[in-house]
Amino acid sequence: MAGIFNTLNRVANQFQSLQQSIGSEFVNTIANSNFSNLAQGARSLQGIAQGVSAFASGLADPSQLIAQFRSRNIFPGAEPQQSSRVSAEIAGGQERDWRVRLSIPGSLSASPMFSPLKRTAGFVFPYTPTIYVQHSADYNNLQPVHSNYPFPVYESSRTDQFTVSGEFLIETAFEAEYWVAAVHFLRTITKMDYGGTGAPPPICRLNGYGDFVFNNVPVVITNFQIDLPSEVDYISTSLENQGVSQNSANSGAISWVPSQSLISITLQPIYSRRKVETFNLNNFMNGGYISGGDGFI
């Protein structure tokens, strides 16, 4: 490498001497005399001298060398496209927080394991997730004998289960702690109190994208999936900063968190019979349930 460096330095010095001997005045004189080919050749010699000089100096500075390689001999469109992600951050000023959030039920709020989630008032997707929502109206076809067309008879309407999928990129210690708390929350929220009160899994409230999209929608989590890819780095973390290690059983507990993962949650809207009995279509149509917190969608 040292021999190549010395050789290129000598070549660069020779080209720089040639460039200085040519001089900008000589190039301008030729250009003004309409000797276009000769002028172009002189400019080419200047460009070669500058390129060799930059390449030789790049051997001493690897970052400059990489920049020289990238700036030459790259076909149009060969540059890699920069991917972008939309971060659902808290809006400033008087704007409300529009991030997709699952509330922590009151029966679970005392757990120190969920301390990172409490800082965001619930389980929040840090980046804008993908959501597929489906509404259905069921009809039963009544087919009289010897008839050409059936008569659809309305039976019921429903909001089907829908999936919320969001990416988690872990770059800081708090984000790693947040990922551990979020996974533990999902494991907890999908279990019943079998050995205690016998209560079923608790109900959460879904909020996101403002008043007319998801506003205090009561939901239960029927399924969740966590992606643990093999091609990413894993970061060591603990929840000691959240007070979890006050319990001696959890002292020194460590988890390894993927630097990039995907969490998908399947939600089912659920309403009490009393709320459904008082449902009024005109009130729903006029947005009357938005401020009431009933969560009808």
Image (spheres, rainbow, N blue to C red):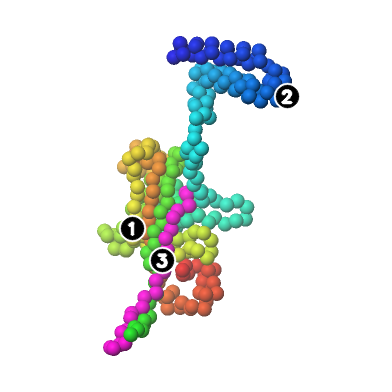
Q: Residues within 10 Å of mark 3 (few under 14, many from 20)?
A: few
Which percent across, then down, holds residue 28?
A: 71, 22
Residue at which label 1 appears:
223
Report how many numbered discs are placed on residues in the image. 3
Residue at which label 2 appears:
32
**Circles 3 and 1: CB atoms closer than 8 Å:** no
Q: Secondary structure at mark 2?
A: helix
Front position in the image: 222 or 5: 5
In the image, residue 9 above or below residue 228: above
Residue 231 figure quarter = top left
Q: Residues within 10 Å of mark 1 (few under 14, many from 20)?
A: some
- The numbered dot on residue 107 is none
Q: Is residue 245 visible?
A: no
- Mark 2–mark 3 Cα distance, whole angstroms, equals 73 Å
Q: Earlier in the sequence, mark 2 or mark 3?
A: 2
In the rendered image, residue 121 lying in the magenta stretch gets the answer no
Which segment is the magenta one? 126-147
Q: Secondary structure at mark 3?
A: loop
Q: Could you tell me the amino acid type at mark 1?
A: Asn
Q: Could you tell me the amino acid type at mark 2?
A: Asn
